[in-house]
């Protein structure tokens, strides 16, 4: 199935707005959205709930339903506006969801997707959203029937979901772009690790940042005991780090975050500033993209995270644009009282042979808790 064909069909059905957060299962679909030459207005939103809200607003203004795309992990973010606004018992706003199915039962996937994959269909049933599942064997006739059913359901003010299995969409012309930043993320992360005191507690965000930190830490130190990788729950690494910092004021706690993750739950910044933990240091690696799921731009490329943090009330903020400045992070953290935020612009791209953690998520949790010197299950 070609994404461009589906988008054309949606436009013919009257859709003129599409919004969402990119997903690796939907990479070919997302590439198609970025290169589509039709008249669909496209929004890359900070989170999936925001995409639903955009869809509600577009419908109020035009009377036309919107299409909202996401990874199934984003269902949690969109439940509130769907259940408390769009649902037929409230405003009755029609909407079409296109959802990438990570963690599909019987298909090997990363640990953070396993449970979400098991309950994906059940969640839509609970939310009273009719759905169909498509894969690479779905025929044009079957897809036409699904879209006809979706159209009928949308006409009565309800929602419909198309759940997409891995490999459903064909490769088309890939969407590529260059953010113009010269520093490579993996080199930057390696230098940060070498600059920080070895006993620093590090909480890293989901995606390639955690994977690169894992490999760089093992390469440099032979271990990663002080690294907690937030493999799922995008946007929540800083709150995890805040929880650690609050319980361990004797530890320097560093959150290594991504621009897309910070955008997803930006309310964390003023809370951190208000709590004002003296041992909290925030590093935002900014490549202006959701790279771990296909490198689609975040839609907020002009955002200065350093200035946002300054406005939120962080004590010290800075933008580090050279490797020499990155090398001074350890010294600057020792000299400055938290909360501090450093924004580091980096280029797009990662090694094709970038690995994944060898231990289970539970094992990594226990290794990190041992590093902190606290009891965990099984000890």
Image (cartoon, helix red, strand yellow):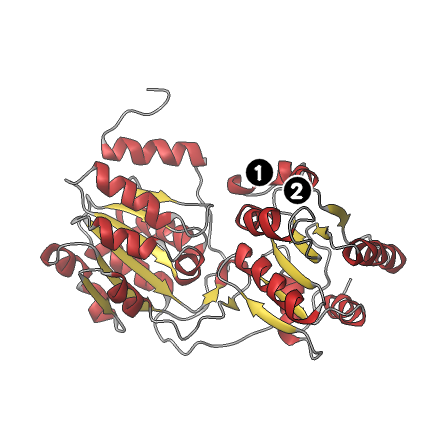
Residue 123 in view of the camera: yes
Q: Which residue does the image show at 20% across and 51% down from the upper left?
A: 276
In which quadrant is the C terminus drawn? Answer: top left
Q: How many marks?
A: 2
Say which element carries label 2. loop
Residue 95 appears at what percent x and percent y?
69, 58
Tag 1 residue: 114
Q: Is residue 108 left or right of residue 378?
A: right
Residue 7 appears at what percent x and percent y?
74, 68
In which quadrant is the N terminus drawn? Answer: bottom right
Q: Which residue does the image show at 37% across and 55% down from the upper left?
A: 267
Q: CA distance from mark 2 to mark 1?
A: 20 Å
Say which element carries label 1. helix
On screen, residue 239 above or below 372: below
**Which numbered marker is on residue 127?**
2
Q: Residues within 10 Å of mark 2 (few under 14, many from 20)?
A: some
Q: Is residue 206 left or right of residue 120?
A: left
Which residue lies most toward the left here? 335
On screen, residue 124 above or below 288: above
Dot 2 or dot 1: first in sequence order is 1
Q: Kindly indicate the quadrant of the structure image that contains residue 176.
A: bottom right
Residue 252 appears at what percent x and percent y?
18, 46
Q: Which residue does the image show at 64% across and 49% down from the upper left?
A: 90
Which is more foreground, mark 2 or mark 1? 2
Q: Kindly indicate the quadrant of the structure image that contains residue 182.
A: bottom left
**Which numbered marker is on residue 183?**
none
């Amino acid at each position: 199935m070609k994404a461009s064909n589906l988008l054309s069909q949606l436009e013919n059905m009257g859709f003129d707005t599409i919004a969402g957060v990119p997903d690796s299962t939907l990479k070919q679909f997302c590439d198609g959205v970025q290169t589509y030459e039709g008249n669909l207005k496209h929004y890359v939103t900070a989170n999936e709930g925001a995409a639903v809200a955009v869809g509600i607003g577009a419908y109020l203004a035009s009377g036309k339903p919107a299409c909202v795309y996401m990874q199934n992990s984003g269902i949690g973010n969109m439940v509130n506006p769907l259940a408390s606004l769009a649902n037929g018992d409230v405003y009755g706003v029609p909407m079409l969801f296109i959802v990438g199915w990570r963690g599909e039962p019987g298909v090997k996937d990363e640990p953070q997707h396993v449970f979400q994959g098991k309950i994906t269909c059940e969640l839509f049933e609970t939310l009273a959203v009719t759905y169909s599942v498509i894969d690479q064997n779905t025929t044009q006739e079957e897809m036409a029937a699904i879209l006809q059913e979706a159209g009928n359901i949308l006409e009565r003010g309800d929602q419909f979901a198309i759940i997409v299995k891995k490999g459903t969409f064909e490769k088309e012309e890939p969407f590529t772009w260059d953010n113009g930043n010269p520093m490579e993320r993996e080199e930057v992360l390696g230098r940060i690790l070498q600059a920080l005191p070895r006993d620093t507690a590090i909480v890293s965000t989901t995606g390639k940042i955690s994977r690169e930190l894992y490999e760089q830490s093992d390469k440099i130190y032979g271990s990663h005991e002080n690294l907690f990788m937030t493999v799922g729950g995008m946007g929540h690494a800083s709150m995890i780090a805040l929880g650690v910092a609050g319980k361990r004021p004797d530890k320097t706690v560093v959150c290594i975050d991504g621009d897309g993750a910070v955008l997803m739950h930006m309310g964390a910044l003023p809370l951190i500033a208000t709590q004002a933990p003296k041992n909290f240091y925030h590093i935002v690696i900014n490549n202006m993209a959701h790279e771990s799921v296909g490198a689609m731009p975040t839609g907020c490329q002009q955002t200065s995270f350093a200035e946002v943090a300054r406005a939120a009330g962080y004590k010290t903020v800075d933008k580090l644009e050279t490797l020499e400045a990155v090398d001074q992070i350890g010294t600057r953290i020792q000299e400055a009282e938290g909360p501090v935020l450093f924004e580091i612009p980096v280029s797009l791209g990662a090694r094709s042979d970038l690995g994944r953690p060898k231990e289970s998520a539970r094992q990594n949790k226990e290794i990190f808790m041992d590093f902190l010197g606290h009891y965990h299950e099984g000890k």
